Image: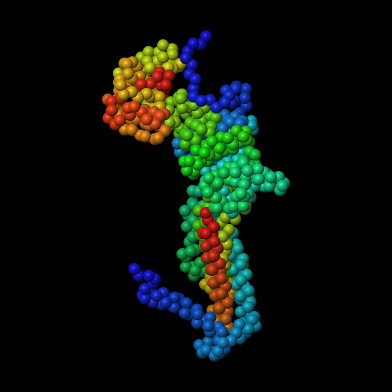
Amino acid sequence: MRRGPSAFNIAAIVLGMGFLYLPIVLLVIYSFNESRLVTVWGGFSTRWYVSLLQNEQLLAAAWVTLRVAFVSATLATILGTLAALGLVRAGRFRGRTLFSSMTYAPLVMPEVILGLSLLLLFVSVGVARGFWTVMIAHTTLTLCYATVVVQARLVSFDEALEEAARDLGAPPWKAFALVTLPNIAPAVAAAWMLAFTLSLDDLVIASFTSGPGATTLPIRIYSAVRLGVSPEINAISTLLIGLVATGVIAVYLLNMRRRTAAP
Amino acid sequence: MNTKPRLNIGAVRSSFAPWADPSAKPLVRFDQVTKRFGGETAVDAVSLDIYEGEFFALLGPSGCGKSTLMRMLAGFETPDLGRITLGGEDLAGRPPHLRPVNMMFQSYALFPHLTVAQNIAFGLRQQKKPKDEIAARVDEMLALVRLEGLAHRKPHQLSGGQKQRVALARAIAPKPRMLLLDEPLGALDRKLREETQFELMALQQRLGMTFLIVTHDQEEAMITADRIAVMRAGQLAQIGRPAEVYEAPNSRYVADFIGDVNLFEARVTEDDGDIIRLTSPEAPDGLEAIEDDEIAIGSTAWLAVRPEKMRVHLDPPPPGPNRLEGVVADIGYLGDWTTYLVELPGGRTIRAARANASRVVDRPVDWDDRVWLTFAPDSAVVLTR
């Protein structure tokens, strides 16, 4: 009997992984480049991280991005949890299929379309584009992801638990807070992380809906690259990758813990 | 003076019979309660009284409306018609958390994120009891269900039987006026279930609490309950003590649902007040049964005879009523009982059961033996529906 992967398997994994991650690894390595030229290695240095700290434009964009991601992820998680509760608990109400399809539509809708439609909405309503419009747009985008994550958990949640809490004297809101919420908390946290990272790296929708003074980091990086790549971009990209990776790993760990804790 | 041979039925648990006292006030009264789901009528104009201190069982096949009836009492379903009162008070419009009844769920519904002690304390916390009082009551409950060492375990660290006892303790802890048990032993294996049935009964006696149990398992209902209500398609088929329901069923449905029964379709030929005589093609010498109620001569009735009341003879008994002849088609040996399936000349199979009272028998009944079955007139019940 043959044990372990064959030479073909190993080659496939190496090629696949290389294809996916080589550019990122190169980007990270060159963020520690001494040289001003992005493609020429001039020795190890952290000088671009230092100069990044003095680049107020980039830092301001990063601050905007973090705030947008934080607020929109929180809003999307609350709304997504409510939508999931409605979809799972309300049974078969009139228009349920329509409601669920409409909740999931942004998952498959091209971002350009979503961004454009939101832009048209904001223009026609006469809202000045800026922080709040990007935030609302990102909530729209991430809401459906949050709903999917929370709904998956709620489906396997025994509704008798909440009934038992009510039977033992807890009013409905308290039964939800004391019994349902602690049990779906890992999924709610995962939904928030997912929404946060999605908002963090969105370029398309943000470029449609942001305005002066609310330039997000992806927009700033994109426009900076068009003028020529500075190693500072590598540095901030590395930080961004670190943040997103942390989020993804946290979501994974939360889900793992839920699975092992389940009886 | 009544000289009729009164039927003294089965084993009677005690003299506890508040339902027979016309002045007694019921704890719970279902008054013409109806519940529909879509086009289906789950509960159909049910009226039922349950008394303080009673162990009452709702028994029926799945989908007969027994769980719906219980969930209406707990407040999880609202009756479409009729009233439910508890201690004389109408429960309409009262949400589950304001009803002084607690329910033990079929799935146990233990809170997975809380420990055993926190689960039991949940209801007491909602009542805003002082901390030391809660702790004392939790300890008392743990002792009651013999789980003293497991206070800090999480539900997923417990066995099925332990979970069941935590669920029971959690429901009893807030001292409800009434405990509702939804298929409480359904998830336990046979041996544990039998033990728990007796424990449940002893617990109810000790607490003096009113218990309402919903079950599809007739054995569970027979062992635990003071009275059983047999349900069929949303309606009550019969209410009575276990022995009454078993020995004096009021319909073929009840006779057949509770235990095994042999039914003979027959025509009434004579009724002299005590003894009814009937004819059936399956009994050459006719049938006889003791029945107080008048039944019209010439009408069709069914004679119900339990297998254990059939006597099996290898030698022909003297001719007379209630005598059947057939061939042993199958033998089921259960250890404590042996069941014989006897095929009558008409082709129908009759069950006869015999307790294996001694280890050895002179002449065992064998497959294909010709046997005669007899039963006493007071062992048969005449059913008209």
Q: Looking at the rendering, in which quadrant would you find the C terminus of chain B?
A: top left
Viewer-side residue, B1 vs B74 = B1
Residue drawn at the location 47% of the way across and 36% of the way down:
B217
| Identity of the residue drawn at 41% across and 77% down | A15
**Relative to A136, does residue A21 appear above or below in the rendering?**
below
Left or right: residue B252 compared with residue A159: left
Q: Position of residue B116 (x, y in %)?
A: 60, 49
Q: How is the image coloured?
A: rainbow
Whether residue A146 sits left or right of residue B380 in the image: it is right
Q: Position of residue B143 (x, y in %)?
A: 63, 43
Instruction: Please state which of residues A129 and B233 is positioned toward the viewer in this rendering.
Output: B233
Q: Is residue A162 visible?
A: yes
Q: Nearer the viewer, residue B301 or B160?
A: B160
Q: Which residue corresponds to the image point at 72% horizontal and 47% vertical from the top-left? A: B132
Residue B302 appearing in the image = no
Q: Note whether A11 is above or below B13 in the view shown.
A: below
Q: Position of residue B3 (x, y in %)?
A: 49, 11
* Quarter of the view holding residue A62: bottom right
Can you say whether A63 is above or below A80 in the image? below
Tell me if B10 is positioned left or right of B361 in this view: right
| Image location (x, y in percent) of residue B220 | 49, 35
Q: How many numbered marks appear?
A: 0
Quadrant in the picture for residue B328: top left
The residue lying furthest to the top in this view is B1
Please tell me which residue lies in front, B316 or B329: B316
Q: Residue at x 58, y 42 (%)?
A: B168
